[in-house]
Image (cartoon, helix red, strand yellow):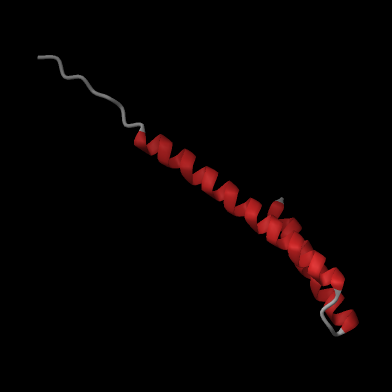
Amino acid sequence: MITRQKRSLELKWEQEHLSNDRYTLEMVRIDDKVKEIITKIKLEEAAIAHRQNTVEGAAPQVSVAT
């Protein structure tokens, strides 16, 4: 869902550029939103990696009775 937002904003940015043929204030705003979304994506990826590492690090403890 977040990646769709990012792609949508990138398309909006491109349309703005094609319409005005220059870098506009609206394009700056779109760039800022894209950066926010990229940050959210990176944070979510880090959270997923952390959960995966936690699961992998929680090795079962085996007790061998003699």
Q: Position of residue 47 (x, y in %)?
A: 54, 43
Lateral position of residue 28 relative to residue 45, left or right: right
Point 47% across, 42% down: residue: 50
Residue 40 versus residue 51 in the image, above or below: below
Q: Position of residue 2 (x, y in %)?
A: 70, 52
* Rendered image quadrant of residue 36: bottom right
From this viewpoint, which residue is outermost toward the left?
66
Q: Which corner quadrant holds the C terminus?
A: top left
Q: Position of residue 32 (x, y in %)?
A: 75, 63
Q: Position of residue 49 (x, y in %)?
A: 48, 46
Residue 51 versus residue 28 in the image, above or below: above
Point 69% across, 56% down: residue: 37
- Counting every numbered tag in the picture gives 0
Lateral position of residue 18 relative to residue 36, left or right: right
Lateral position of residue 33 relative to residue 38, left or right: right
Task: Say which of 27 and 53 sits in front.
Answer: 27
Point 82% across, 71% down: residue: 27
From this viewpoint, which residue is outermost toward the bottom?
21
* Rendered image quadrant of residue 6: bottom right
From this viewpoint, which residue is outermost toward the right?
19
Task: Say which of 28 and 12 sits in front.
Answer: 28
Point 82% across, 79% down: residue: 23
